[in-house]
Image (spheres, helix red, strand yellow):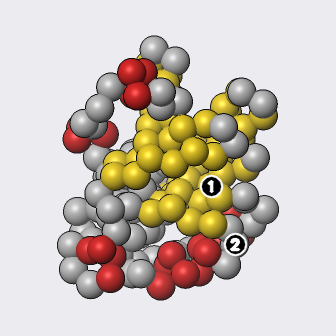
Amino acid sequence: MKIGVISDTHGLLRPEAIETLQGCDAILHAGDVGNFDILGTLGEIASVTAIRGNIDLHGACADLPATEMVSLGGITFYMLHSARDLDLDPVAAGVRVVVSGHSHSPSIQDKQGVLFLNPGSAGPRRFGLPVTLAIVEINADKVRAEIVRLIE
């Protein structure tokens, strides 16, 4: 199973993101969507699970949940916009992947067998950070994540 993980689009869904997400079985958006139409466009590629971020407090995005737990390919993902707001023990909750955004800084860390994934920001470039998203592949019980740079 191939899962696209995107965050912090801030109203901008780049063609490079759409191209990179082609062939995904599911897409997770970790908040700061910025424009609800982005979720519709992503939904044309694969099923989408999205949460709201701190800029999504008005309009249609305000109705998105603050957190979400989803099972994909037998793996449990927990989504929240800022990892600082983690409100559960992922090991005790049986979560294998914690997905967050907010910082715009892409990272992949393993903590006690839990993969903490921040795909970075796929929207407007900010803070001199790269424009990225992530691809997660699930094979049997193995989870592999990769950060994909969208533009140089």
Task: Work out whether 91 lies above or below 4.
Answer: above
Query: Quick check: 77 left or right of 60?
Result: right
Percent of width and height locating residue 86: 27, 37
Instruction: Pinpoint residue 76: horizontal percent, then vertical percent.
Output: 54, 38
Residue sitting at x 27%, y 84%: 59
Regarding residue 129, the answer to whether it shows in the image is no
> At 65% from the left edge and 58% from the top edge, which residue is drawn?
26
The relative height of residue 78 versus residue 55 in the rendered view (above or below) is above
Q: With 70 as the anchor, is 145 left or right in this view?
A: right
**Amino acid of disc 1:** Gly
Q: Nearer the viewer, residue 68 or 127?
A: 68
Amino acid of disc 2: Ile
- In which quarter of the view is residue 78 placed? top left
Q: Position of residue 73 (x, y in %)?
A: 69, 42
Mark 2 touches mark 1? (CB < 8 Å): yes
| The C terminus sits in image quarter | bottom right
Q: Secondary structure at mark 2?
A: loop
Distance, label 2 to label 1, CA atoms, is 10 Å
- Residue identified by numbered label 1: 4
Dot 1 alpha-carbon crowd within 10 angstroms: few under 14, some 14 to 19, many 20 or more: many
Say whether residue 109 is left or right of residue 101: right
Residue at (63, 66) in percent of width and height: 47
Residue 131 spot, x, y in % from top left: 50, 58
- Tell which circle, 2 or 1, labels the residue nearer the N-terminal end: 1
Disc 2 target residue: 45
Q: Quadrant of residue 14?
A: bottom right
- The residue lying at 68 percent from left, 63 percent from top is 21
